[in-house]
Amino acid sequence: METPLANEILFAVFILGVICCGLALVTIRKTTALHNSFGVLCTWQMYADIAQLMIITAYCLLSIDIAPSPHAIASIISCQTIETLYFFTGQLHVLMAVHRFVHILAPRYAKGWQSATSFLLLICTGISIARILLMTILDTRMYWVYDRFTSLWFIVDTPWTHFYEMYLEVCWSIGEMIAILTLDSITLTHLIKWKSSISKERAQKHQHVEIRLVLQSCCQCVPTAAVTILYFLVFPNMESQFLKFMCSSFVLSFGNVLDAVIILIFHFRIRLFAKNDIGPVSTNGINGIDLVTS
C-alpha cells in the first residue's frame, strides 16, 4: 500500500533539518564555550547529519522510473553510506559524554583529550565503516532496501538478519546509551561532591549545572532511543501503513533533526547574533564547568 504524502513529509523534514543544523553550526561558531573539543564533536555531528539528510532525501525522492534497482550496487552503496553516517553520529554522543567526564574528573588530561579529538573522530569513522562491512561479511545478500511504493526501509531477510538487527543495531545502541548515562552519572556524582565542598557564593554561580548535565545526558540518548525503539521494536508490530512510515522513514530522518535541536536547546541565544563574542569561558577543570556541561 502506498503511503500518502510520504515524499512531502520527507522533504519537509529535510528542509527543517538543514535549517536546524545550519543554525546549530552558526551557534557553535559564535559560542566561545564551544571553541574546544566539544564544539568540534558537535560540528562534525552536524556535518554528518546534513550529509545523511541529503543522501536520504535525494535517494528516497527519486521516482521509480529513474531510480536504480534496490539491489543495484548504486542503491546498496547509498544505503550503506546512510547507515555509516547514522553509526558515526551515534558514537559522537558517547564522545561528548567522555568530554564531560574528562573535564570534570581528570582535568589534567583535558589538553591531551583536546589533541586526541581528531584521531578519535577517525576511530569512530573506522568503527562505523567496520560495522556496515560486517553486515556484508555476515551475508552478502543482507543490506538495507528502500521500498519506493510503500516508502518504508527494511533489511533484506536472510538467516543473519535477526542476529544483525538484535546485536549490531539494538544491543549496540543500548550499549551506547548505557555508556552515556554511566559516564554522566559518575560525572554528576563528582560534580555534586565538588559543589558541597565549596562556598555557598561560588556554588550559587553554578546552581543549575547538575540539572543541565542531567538534561543533556538524557537528551543525547533521545535520537538513538527513538530509532531503536520505534524502528526495531515498534515498527514490526504496526498495522497502519502511515504509522509504519512514521516509525521507519520519518524517524530515520528526524533523528538527524533532533541532534541539531539538542544543540540549539542548550546553546542558542538571540544575543549570539547581536555580538561576535559572548565572553571568555575558562577551560581549566572545574573552573570550566559551563564548558563541560555544553
Image (tube, rainbow, N blue to C red):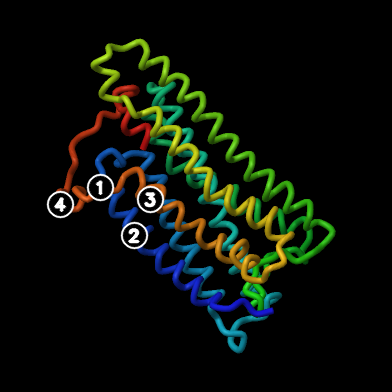
Amino acid type for the residue under numbered disc 4: Ala
Element on which disc 2 rests? helix
Amino acid type for the residue under numbered disc 1: Arg
| Spatial CA span between label 2 and label 4 | 17 Å
User: Which mark sits nearer the N-terminus, 3 or 2?
Assistant: 2
Q: How far across and how far down the image is residue 17, in percent?
A: 42, 62
User: Which mark sits nearer the N-terminus, 4 or 1?
Assistant: 1
Is residue 97 rendered to the left or right of residue 268? right
Residue at 63% over, 51% down: 228
Vertical order, 135 against 217 (above or below): below
Q: How far across and how far down the image is residue 81, in percent?
A: 57, 63
Residue at 19% over, 53% down: 273
Outermost residue, left side: 275
Q: Mark 3 points at which residue?
A: 43
Is residue 159 rendered to the left or right of residue 259? right
* The one of 284 and 232 positioned closer to us in this rendering: 232
Residue 269 numbered mark, or none: 1
Outermost residue, front side: 240
Q: How far across and how far down the image is residue 38, in percent?
A: 38, 40
User: Which mark sits nearer the N-terminus, 3 or 1?
Assistant: 3
* The one of 112 and 161 positioned closer to us in this rendering: 161
Nearest to viewer (mark 2 / mark 4): 4
User: Which mark sits nearer the N-terminus, 2 or 4?
Assistant: 2
How many circles with numbers are drawn on the protein?
Answer: 4
Q: Name the residue under label 4.
A: 274
Nearest to viewer (mark 3 / mark 1): 1
Residue at 78% over, 51% down: 163
Outermost residue, bottom side: 65
Q: Mark 2 points at which residue?
A: 22
User: Which mark sits nearer the N-terminus, 4 or 3?
Assistant: 3
Vertical order, 55 against 104 (above or below): below
